[in-house]
Image (cartoon, grey):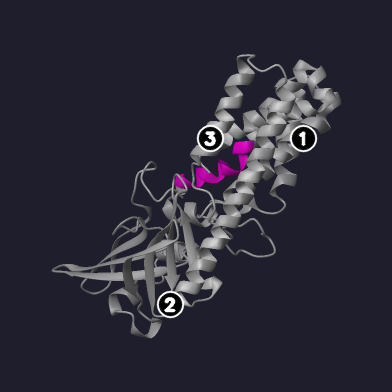
Amino acid sequence: MDTGSHLLFGATLAGLSLVDPTVSAHPDLLYAVLAATLIGSHAPDFDAVMRLKGGSAYIRNHRGLTHSLPAPLVWAPLIGLPIAWFFGVQEWSWTVILWAFIAVCFHITLDLFNAYGVQCMRPFTRRWLHLDVLCLLDPYLFAMHAAVVLLWTTGATPNPVRMFLLVYALTLIYMLWRFLVSRSVIRSLCRAYRVNLGQITLTPTLFGMAWQFVIDTGDAFIKGNLNRSVVHEEAMLYKRSPERLAAAAEATIDVDGVQAFHHLAACIHVDVEEHADGYLVIWSDVRFWHKKHTPFTAAVRLDRNFNVIHERVGWNKKMWEPPFV
């Protein structure tokens, strides 16, 4: 999810830690736990530093090792021990480490529920896993957690422990409900198009009233949306089989940016534009679409001899523009 949401959940996790009598009885320990949950809720995204090495490096590494299966076991003591020492609560170091661990795990879980995905099962598999349930920013979760932080910091609630238990129970129920709805949508599309589960990819919309979908029919991608059980097709894009790729597209396959793009992309479409001075080859991931635009691309400009002049890989949209992944 977005940085603001992760930090907000870090704050509410600190509030949830009040269920531990040791934390609730020691204000200095609560401050240490708050620091640990705030940092732990953002720590897996420290891999964003790879942006400095370019788009290809970022795509290969973002939500990879820092979000992997053993990552919480590394992040928790790495965050918890220095914080416990800084706040002078070394005798409760394990409590601080525990809540840092919970914060990191919750971060990875939220990213798993997103459509972009996460490599959370490394080192056993480098496969990208995504449940396609929550947007990058879920307005309902954000509003609910922001409200309880406001109530907590202003002292407007007489029983913060009960309030944080309630908000996390509602959070888990909401995430489960969204998951069940998404599976129901997929089953409806399977019946409508007579395809298998694995041929359908969903993308949630911001307010959850509709779902975008991409169906892989084998030789084409069908783009559309489903709103209140009504299916509306937007477009159909025909694929190019590997043996029928245009020479210009084939010449870009080993380009670093294209290789990085193929590492992540799931529904790949390629388009070749011929110009007077060469070619523009655009690889796009069709599952991320809005209207006629597919903003996650790898674009390579070639000269007439298929030599690479320029390449770019990444998102061609603003953060606040759809799709929200």
In primary-sequence order, the first of circles 1 and 3 is: 1
- Where does the image place residue 25, in percent across and percent down from the top left? 82, 18
Q: CA distance from mark 1 to mark 2?
A: 48 Å
Quadrant in the picture for residue 88: top right
Residue bearing mark 3: 142
As for residue 45 lying within the magenta part, the answer is yes
Answer with left or right where residue 101 lies relative to residue 232: right
Kindly identify which residue carries mark 1.
Answer: 97
Residue 152 appears in the picture as rendered: yes
What element does badge 2 sit on?
A: loop
Vertical relation: 65 (above or below) 96: below
Q: Which range is magenta? A: 41-52
Provide the major secondary structure of the magenta segment.
Answer: helix
Observer-side mark, 1 or 2, equals: 2
User: Which label sits on residue 217?
Assistant: 2
Question: Of callouts 1 and 2, which one flags the residue occurring earlier in the amino acid sequence?
Answer: 1
Q: Residue at x 46, y 62 (%)?
A: 260
Q: Nearer the viewer, residue 318 or 81?
A: 318
